[in-house]
């Protein structure tokens, strides 16, 4: 019985640790949000891992519907494609920090966390002319020490209400998944890049957004940036 109880406590501790690291509502290691105001009939589209060579096509679709979104850009990708990166903010979209090279942050020391976030913050500030105020950890993985780094740069962590799985699902399933989880204040996570890949195939993402936007607008939802959906002036 004692062994069983101890085993149960061990499993509970492991589950709690896993939630602290990856739970969408976890704020254990750093301030973070995963949805906006529920009473606000709006949805925030967010895009990670960019910019990529296909980001301009995504921008054209968003512009066609007059939609503004939030793009969590990787510093290394912004350095590789500065004109594409800059086109995102020039179109009125919000920019967030997604680290320099998109690593897992777990089991990393404080110096590594500070370098990844700090280097990206410097790159994105130079490219866009203003410092990001939002941060999304790659893979949604947070770690001890991240809170100190976020505080240094004035960054609020942003998780998601629903992740699209658009790197592995076809467009029709992405649309079905996101539309099923629509709701006031929802933050949807998609990707306009694929980590550090050059010229990645984001065709599923582009097509999903092309199909999804008219459906969400038809359903009566507005499209806002993360800062807007949080009803804040970040």
Image: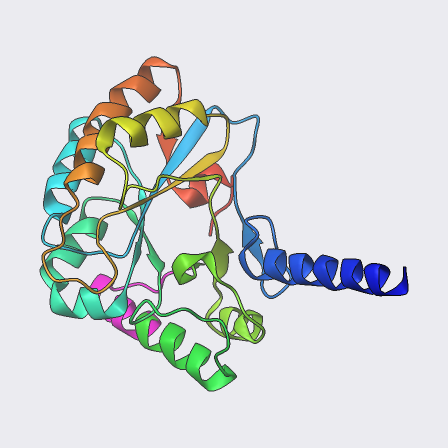
- Give x and y (percent) for residue 27: 62, 57
Instruction: Locate residue 62: give its quadrant.
Output: top left
Left or right: where does residue 41 sit relative to residue 25?
left
- Give x and y (percent) for residue 141: 48, 62
Query: Quick check: 109 above or below 84?
Result: below
Q: Residue at x 47, y 34 (%)?
A: 186
Viewer-side residue, 25 vs 78 = 25
Viewer-side residue, 113 vs 93 = 113
Q: How many marks do you count on the picture?
A: 0
Viewer-side residue, 170 vs 70 = 170
Colouring: rainbow
* Magenta span dominant secondary structure: helix
**Residue that extends furthest to the right in the rendered view of this protein:** 1
Which residues are the magenta region? 121-133
- Give x and y (percent) for residue 64: 15, 28
Left or right: where does residue 201 sit relative to residue 140?
left
Instruction: Locate residue 174: give its quadrant.
Output: top left
Q: Residue at x 46, y 27 (%)?
A: 181
Instruction: Locate residue 56: give its quadrant.
Output: top left
Query: Quick check: 178 above or below 73?
Result: above
Left or right: where does residue 208 sit relative to residue 41?
left
Q: Residue at x 47, y 63 (%)?
A: 155
Query: Quick check: 125 above or below 60?
Result: below
Q: Is residue 14 magenta?
A: no
- Give x and y (percent) for residue 222: 38, 25
Quadrant in the picture for the N terminus: bottom right
């Amino acid at each position: 019985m004692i062994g069983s109880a101890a085993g149960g406590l061990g499993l509970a501790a492991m589950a709690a640790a896993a939630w602290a690291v990856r739970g969408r509502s976890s704020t254990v290691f750093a301030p973070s949000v995963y949805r906006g105001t529920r009473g606000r009939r709006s949805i925030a589209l967010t895009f990670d891992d960019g910019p990529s060579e296909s980001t301009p096509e995504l921008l054209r679709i968003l512009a066609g519907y007059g939609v503004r979104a939030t793009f969590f850009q990787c510093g290394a990708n912004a350095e590789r494609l500065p004109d594409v990166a800059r086109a995102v903010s020039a179109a009125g979209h919000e920019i967030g920090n997604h680290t320099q090279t998109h690593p897992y942050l777990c089991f990393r020391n404080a110096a590594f966390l500070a370098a990844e976030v700090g280097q990206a913050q410097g790159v994105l500030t130079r490219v866009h002319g203003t410092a990001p105020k939002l941060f999304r950890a790659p893979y949604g993985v947070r770690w001890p020490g991240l809170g100190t780094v976020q505080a240094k740069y004035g960054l609020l962590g942003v998780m998601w209400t629903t992740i699209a799985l658009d790197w592995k699902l076809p467009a029709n399933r992405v649309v079905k998944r996101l539309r099923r989880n629509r709701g006031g204040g929802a933050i949807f996570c998609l990707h306009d890049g694929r980590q550090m890949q050059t010229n990645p195939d984001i065709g599923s993402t582009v097509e999903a957004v092309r199909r999804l936007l008219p459906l969400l607008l038809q359903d009566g939802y507005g499209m806002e940036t993360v800062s807007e959906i949080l009803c804040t002036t970040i």
